[in-house]
Amino acid sequence: MEERKAEGTGSSSSGKMNGVIIESNAIFDLAFERDRNVSYIVGLAEANRIALIVPEYALVEADGQSVSIIEARENKIREFGQFLGQLGRGNLYQPTVPTVREQLDSLLSNCNQDRIRFQETLEDLRQICTVIPQTPQAHVMGELRFKSALPPFKSDDCQIYEAILEFIRLHRPEYQAIFFLTKDREDFDWQEINRELATLGVEISFSSGECIRRLRELLQ
C-alpha cells in the first residue's frame, strides 16, 4: 500500500480522533482498487488524521471470500483455454488462437497478482487499523441475533455487527465521532440498526463519498 500524506492532525480540541469502522466490502474495494474514496479514507488513517477500525471477523471473512473469488476467475479462464484449444483445431481459428492464449496467460498472471495484493492489503490493514476482536460474548450475541431473525439477518453480518456493538459500547467515549461505513444497504439499512447505532452515537454511511464529506466537515 503506497504511502499517503495529509496535512494536519485528526484530533479535535478535546484531543479525540474521529473513527471510521469498515467491513468486508471496503477491504475488497481497497485490494481490488474498486473505490478511490476508500483508498483516500485509508490514507487519512495512515496520516494519523482518523482512526480506522475493522472487525477481526471481517478480515477473516474477506480473506476466505477472496480465495473463492480468485479461484473462480482462474477456473473460468482455464475453461475458456480448453474451449480455445478446441477452436484451434479448425483452420479458420488457428492464426488467432496463439495470440488469445497469450492474453489468457496474462489474465491468469493477473489473478495471481490479485492473490498477492489481497494478502498484502490484509497485512497493511492489520498494521493501520484498530482491530475489533471477535470475543466469545460477541460470537454468542451474533448467534442469538441470527437465530432470532434480526437484522442484518445473515450469519456473518450478525457476527460482525455484534462485534462492532461491543466495541462501541466499550470505546465510544474515546472518539469525537464514529462512522460505520458499509455498502451493504440491503443488509444494514434497517430501522432497528439505524436506531441502535444512533443511540450509541454512531453515524452509519452507505457511501464512501458521503463518509468523506462528513469527515472533512469534522477535520476542518
Image (cartoon, rainbow, N blue to C red):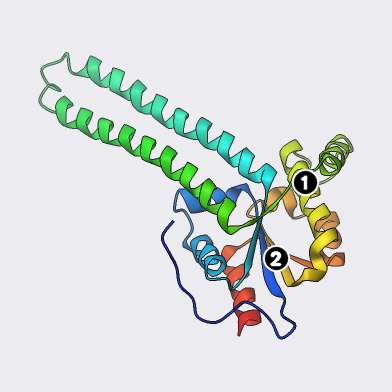
Residue 129 relative to residue 33: left or right: right
Judge whether 37 appears above or below 88 on screen: below
Helix, strand or loop for disc 1: loop
Tag 2 residue: 179
Q: Mark 1 Cα within 10 Å, few/some/many (few <14, many 20+)?
A: many
Q: Residue at x 23, y 17 (%)?
A: 85
Q: In x, y percent, where is residue 204?
A: 72, 63
Q: In x, y percent, where is residue 220?
A: 60, 85
Q: In x, y percent, where is residue 69?
A: 50, 34
Residue 150 relative to residue 30: left or right: right
Q: Residue at x 58, y 51 (%)?
A: 126
Q: Mark 2 Cα within 10 Å, few/some/many (few <14, many 20+)?
A: many
Q: Residue at x 54, y 62 (%)?
A: 42
Tag 1 residue: 152
| Along the line of sight, the residue nearer the viewer: 169 or 179 | 169
Judge whether 8 appears above or below 174 on screen: below
Quadrant location of residue 3? bottom left
Q: Report the Cα–Cα distance between label 1 and label 2.
A: 17 Å
Residue 26 visible to the viewer: no
Front: mark 1 or 2: 2
Residue 128 visible to the viewer: yes
Helix, strand or loop for disc 2: strand
Which residue type does callout 1 highlight?
A: Pro
Residue 100 relative to residue 78: left or right: left
Judge whether 82 appears above or below 101 on screen: above
Q: In x, y percent, where is residue 122?
A: 54, 46
